[in-house]
Every structure is written in C-alpha cells, then in structure tokens.
Image: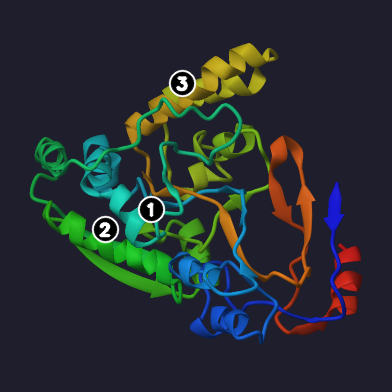
Amino acid sequence: MVQRQQAGHRAYQRGLAGAVGAEQGDDAAVGYGQADVVEKVPYTQIASLSGQPDVTVPTFPIVAYDAIWLNHKYGPFADRKVRQALNYALDKSAIVKAVYAGKAEVNNSTIAKTKFWSKSVPAYAFDEAKAKQLLAASKYPKGFKLELKVPAGDSVHQSIAVIAKDAWSKLGIDVSISQEETNTLFTEYSKGNYQAAIPLPTLTSDVLVPDELALAWLVWTPGYQSFFTQYKSPTVAGIVKKANTATQESEQAKLWPQAQQVSMTEAPWVPQRMGPAWVGEVERTIALVVLVGAAGAVYFAVILATGAYTLTDLKRNALRR
C-alpha cells in the first residue's frame, strides 16, 4: 500500500547526505526553512533539529546492519579466539551512546534483524580482560598489524574505526585506518583486497525473512563467499540450510535462533548496531511517499536526484517508480 500526503506547492530539496550522515548545511537548511526534507539526519543532530518549531524527525524501521567485516584469509582472522577477542574488546554500548546518540541498539546477530530474530541471544558484552585472555590463548598472543578500511566522508563509521583502533590497541593490535572512495572500497572488498573493512556506508535489505541474508553471509559459495569474508562453518551452514528448507514455521522458529546463537559464538565479524532510519521533515511539508510493507516495515519509495523540486515535480517522479 502506497500512502501519499499533500500540503501545497512547496519546494523539495533532497539532503546532500549520501548514504550516512549529512553535511552541516543540510540539516541547518531544514532548521532555517531553506529545505523541506533532509534524508538520513546524522544521529548527533536529531535532538537539536527536533527542538525546532515545525520540524519533526520521525523514525522509519528498516532492515539494516552494521559491522566491521573481517577477511578470514588474513592470518589472524582464521583464529576464532582472535575474532572473539575483537568483539569483547569493543564497547558497543558506548558506541551506541557516543556515535548513534543512543538511537540504536547493540547488535546480537550475524545478520540483520528479520523474522525469527531472537533477543535471547547475547551480544558480546564489553570485557577487556576476557579479550586479553582470548588473544593470549590464540596464535597471535602479542598482537598484529591491521588495516581497517572505511568509506571516505563517512563520519559515523570513521568514528567507529577510531574507537576500535583505540580499544584494540590495548590488546597489542596496531590498527591503521584507511579511507577510500565508496565504489573503490567495495570493489576492492569484493576482490578480497582488505584485512578488515566497513565496505559500505549503509547495508540494508528489503527482505523481511532471514533466508536471503543468511544464505549469502553464513553459507560460503563461490559467488558471494560469505559476503566476501571467506567465513566457512559447516555447522552454521547446515543449520541455515535446514532452516531454509523447513516447511513448518514452528521448525523455522527453532532453527533460526540456533543459527543466530552458533554464528555469534563463532564471531565471523564484529557486529555493531541495529537501528532505525531517520529523516528530518518540516511539519507542514508532505514531500514523502512511503511504502508500508509486510510485517509493518516502512520503506522510502521516493529517492530523487539531488536538487530542488516543486511538489508537482516530486509527485510526478514518485509516480514513475
């Protein structure tokens, strides 16, 4: 069902934010009445924008996932103890507060929050002592050098990278942060030319069941290679395949949380957060078309090129999609 609202002939200006965050001028433009809508308001700007007259910052739940992805062909990450140590050493609750302004939740899954997700599976709690014990018991007790690649201009993930660098340095891991243009970064990532990376500013799905993501990320295939991490686990793959072919929902409801639990224990990567999408919107302006899909998920159905549009132009572009 597509829902439309109208409120006069007003101009629409898409925020110049890119996939994550916005330049200061974009959210300021909403505040000063120069723009009607800004997409993906930075988490740190939500409170200041919400406090302004005639400005609302609603949330729209989407299937999104954030993680630091690890290349298992890089020696240290073939060792599960090392991967677990990285997870325990990173204070993700502090990241949610500092980077996401408390507007997200710590991730407790190796795939996005979809149907059959279980809140009973524990996330990795911050435990520096345990992280040091795990690394000491690994094949790399004295640490190692690590290059962490992030998208250039992505202030959110650059902040996470800086926090990770500091946290992991306490384990003897020497992290260097490399910023690369997004298209170049993902091309290199998909070729396996990385050690650790946040390959995209956002990672979302329009599928509300776990099958597609789990088969792509948790089951190694020659094409997708566990989202190019080279993670291989016969145990997890077996559970995922069984869940995918199960015909009874009651059986799926048992198997998917099991896959979530076992894969989290194996720590193939470093999950970060799950959270909503945000948009800053001038109250009088209705320049949005939203799609209300299955399970109540809400998606934007209008993504226009950067520029200024009248409401008539906006409606015409929306109807073409």
- Residue type, numbered disc 1: Ile
Picture coordinates of residue 10 (x, y %)? 81, 81
Query: How many residues crowd mark 3 within 10 Å: few (<14), some (14–19), many (20+)?
Result: some
Instruction: State the CA–CA distance, disc 2 to disc 1.
Output: 9 Å
Q: Secondary structure at mark 3?
A: helix
Q: Secondary structure at mark 2?
A: helix
Residue 50, picture quadrant: bottom right
Report if residue 234 is visible in the image. Answer: no
Picture coordinates of residue 186 (x, y %)? 51, 63
Q: Which residue is mark 2?
A: 164
Please report the residue visible at 49 percent of the width from the left and 35 percent of the height from the top.
Answer: 218
Instruction: State the CA–CA distance, disc 2 to disc 3.
Output: 28 Å
Query: How many residues crowd mark 1 within 10 Å: few (<14), some (14–19), many (20+)?
Result: many
- State left or right for residue 171 relative to residue 181: left
- State left or right for residue 321 relative to residue 139: right
Looking at this view, name the residue that lies furthest to the front.
Answer: 53
Instruction: State the CA–CA distance, disc 3 to disc 1.
Output: 22 Å
Query: Which tag, 2 or 1, sits closer to the chain's start?
Result: 1
In the picture shown, does residue 15 fall above or below 258?
Answer: below
Residue 267, picture quadrant: top left
- Residue type, numbered disc 3: Gln
**Residue 290 circle label:** none
Query: How many residues crowd mark 2 within 10 Å: few (<14), some (14–19), many (20+)?
Result: many
Q: Secondary structure at mark 1?
A: strand
Q: Which residue is mark 3?
A: 258
Query: Which tag, 2 or 3, sits closer to the chain's start?
Result: 2
Q: Which residue is mark 1?
A: 68
